[in-house]
Amino acid sequence: MVKKKTAAIYILVILGSTLLGAFAGIVSAYLGSAPSLDQVNIRQNFTTYIYDINGRLITDLYTQNRIPVNINELPDHVKNAVIAIEDDQFYNHHGINFIAFGRAILVNLKEWSFAQGGGTITMQLARNVFLTQKKTIMRKLEEFLWAVQIERKYSKDEILEAYLNEFYLNHGLYGIEAGAKAFFGKSAKDLTLSEAALIAGVIRWPTRYSPFVNPDIAVERRNFVLSRMQEVGFITAAEAAAAKAEPLVLAERQSRVVQARYFVDYVTGQLVDMYGEDMVFNGGLHVYTTLDLDMQKAAEKALLEGLPVNRSHEGDLTQPQGAVLAMVPQTGEIRVMVGGRGEDSFNRSVQALRSPGSAIKVFAYTAAIDRGITPATVYVDEPTEFKLVTGETWSPRNYYETFAGPITVREALEDSLNVVAAQVVDQLGPQTVIDYAKKMGITTFVEQGRVNDIGLAPLALGGMTRGVSLLELATAYGVLANQGIKSEPFAIWRVTDSQGNVLYEHTPRYEVVLSEPTSYIMTDLLRGVIERGTGRNANIGRPAAGKTGTHSDYQDAWFMGYTPDLVAGVWFGEDAPKRMVYQGVIYGSWNAATIWANFMKEALKNTPVRDFPKPSGLVEGILIDTKTGLLVRDNCNLPPEETRREIFIAGTEPTEYSPRCSQPWWQNIPFLNQ
C-alpha cells in the first residue's frame, strides 16, 4: 500500500513538473514574443498641406486626416478631459492597470462578451499604432507586451501626445487637433472646457457620439465626461456645472473641396517622385508652391465662360476642352495651371500635345531677327511653290486665300501670312528654326524617321508630328518676355516636414538663349500682333505681346502672350481632334485671344502697368518705305500709309534710300549736290 502511495506521489510530482514546465515554457515564449525597444517606434500618419504663393491652403493630402499637435501647447483641461474618461490612472501605472483590467474581465464573464476592455491609454495606443482592432484574447495579451515596452521607451507625456494625435473621431478625423478644427473651427489649444470634454467623449464610440451625427447624445456624453473630470478632481463642481450649461455651438461642416485640381495632381506627382507615396499622404509635409489662387480662379472663370459647348457630343466629358497656363517669365514660377473643365484628371496644359498652328511662327521669326533679318525686310507674298526634300512640291495658302504682294516682316507676322513664314523657314533652313525652338524650350520635335518635323509646313504652319504642350510653349514665349533668358518652369518652392524642418528648397534655373536686342525686337513685333494684327481681341490696355494660332482645320485654337510680368497661354480643342464648328459658328484663335484677355485683365489688375525694358544696341525711329524696306528721305512724297518709323538692332538698319521716292530735278545734277 505504501509503495502504491509512493508511486502515485512520484507520478503527481512528474505530472506537476511537466505541467509547470509547460506553463513556464508558454510564459517564457509569451515574454519572448515581446517586441524589442528598437521595434517600438511610434510613427503616425499626418496630413500633408499644399499652399499657394501667398501661404493660402490649396488642399490637403492624407489617408488619415491627422494634424500633429504638441502636448506642451495644450492647456490642462484639454489633456485632463481625455485622461478622465479614458484612463484616469494614466500617470500611476506602467502601461497596464490590473485593477481596471480585472474588473473588465468580471464584467465580460458576466455578460459573456467583450463589453469592456480595461485598456489603458498606453494599451489603446499600442493597439492603434502596432496591432489590430480584433477583439481576441491573444491580441489583448499582445497589447500587454507592447504597452510595457512603450512605457519603457517613452515618457508619459510622449505617450499622451501620441495618443492625442492618434484617436479616431469619425468623418475621417484623427486626433484632437483635426477634431477641434472640424467640430469647432479652432485649434485644440483654444478649446473651452466644454468643447474639450465633448471631443474626449467621442473617442469611445465615434459613430454614435459625433456631434455632427447625434448632437443631443453628444451633449449627454460631454456632460458625463465633465462629471468624471469632477470625480477625479480635475475640475470643481462649479466648473463642471458651468461647462454643462454651455450650449453646443458647432462650426459649419465643411465639405472637402479640392482647388486647382490639375495643379494639385501635377505637384503631387512630383512629390511622390521625390519622397514616395507614404511620405506624401502620411508624412505631414508642408508644401509651398508657386500657384496664385486668385489668378487660378480668374483663369478657370475666363476659360469656362469663353469655351463653347458641343451640344451634339455624346461622350463622358464636355467638349471642347481647354487649358490655361501662366508663369512668371523672370523666375519660371507657375502661377496658373488649368488643365481642363475640371471633369477629369487629364492635364491638358502639360500632358496634351497639340498642333500649335501659327503660334509656332515665333521661332522662325526669332531665328530670322537673330540672324540679321529685320522688321523692315521685305518678302513678296504671292503664290509660291516650294520643292520639298521628298521631291514633292508644296504651295502654302494664306488664311483668307489672298496675297499681299511686297510686305515687311512686321506686317507679315501681324497678319500671320503663311506664305511669308514658309519663305523665312526656307531661307534659314528648317533645322535652324528647330534649333532655336529647342533652345527656347520645345522638346517635342521629331527629327528622325520618315515622318518628321524637318520641313517647311511643320515650322511655318505648326503641323508638328507630335505637337507641343502648353507648358513648353509658354516657357518658350517667356524667353522673349525675359530679355532672352529661359527660366525653367517649376511649381514647388519649398517642402518642410511636420516639425518645420526644410526638406527641399528650389533653386531657379536660368539660361541665356537669345540676345536682349533680338528678344526686344521680337517683342515689339508681337506687340503689333495685338495692336493691329490677328490678336486684336487680346488687347488689355497695357503693353503686351502675343501670337495667335489656329489649326488649318480649326481643330486647335491658341493664344500665347505676355506682359513684362506674366507670360500666359490659352489652348482649346476637342480631345479627339475635330473641326470646331458649333451651331454654325467657327471657333478659333480669336476666341482664345478673348479668353486670354479676360484672364490677364483680372490677373494683373493689382499689378502696376509697366513697359518692356529696352536694352542698348538698338536704333529706332528710322523712317522706311514699307514696300521696299529702304530708307525714306525727309522730302519723300510717298503716301503716309506706305511709310513707317521702324526699330532695328544696331548695324542691321538699311543704308540705302528707297527708289520710290521722287526727287527734285536739281538732286539729279551731280555738281549741284557736291
Image: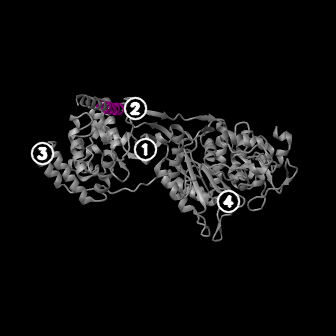
Task: Report whether 283 appears left or right of 138.
Answer: right
Q: In front of the other: label 3 or label 1?
A: 3
Image-quadrant location for residue 146: top left
What kind of residue is marked 2?
Gln
Residue numbers of the magenta segment: 16-31
Between marks 3 and 2, how big is the CA–CA gap? 42 Å
Q: In front of the other: label 1 or label 2?
A: 2
Between marks 1 and 2, how big is the CA–CA gap? 29 Å
Between marks 3 and 4, how big is the CA–CA gap? 74 Å
Between marks 2 and 4, how big is the CA–CA gap? 57 Å
| Residue identifier under label 1 | 49
**At 32% across and 57% down in the image, what residue appears?**
252
Q: Which of 125 and 25 is in front in this view?
A: 25
| Residue identifier under label 4 | 577
**At 24% across and 49% down in the image, what residue appears?**
109
Q: Which mark is residue 39?
A: 2
Answer yes or no: do the residues labelled 1 and 2 have beta carbons within 8 Å? no
Q: Residue 598 in the image: state x and y as whole percent.
A: 54, 57
Image-quadrant location for residue 39: top left
Between marks 4 and 1, how big is the CA–CA gap? 37 Å
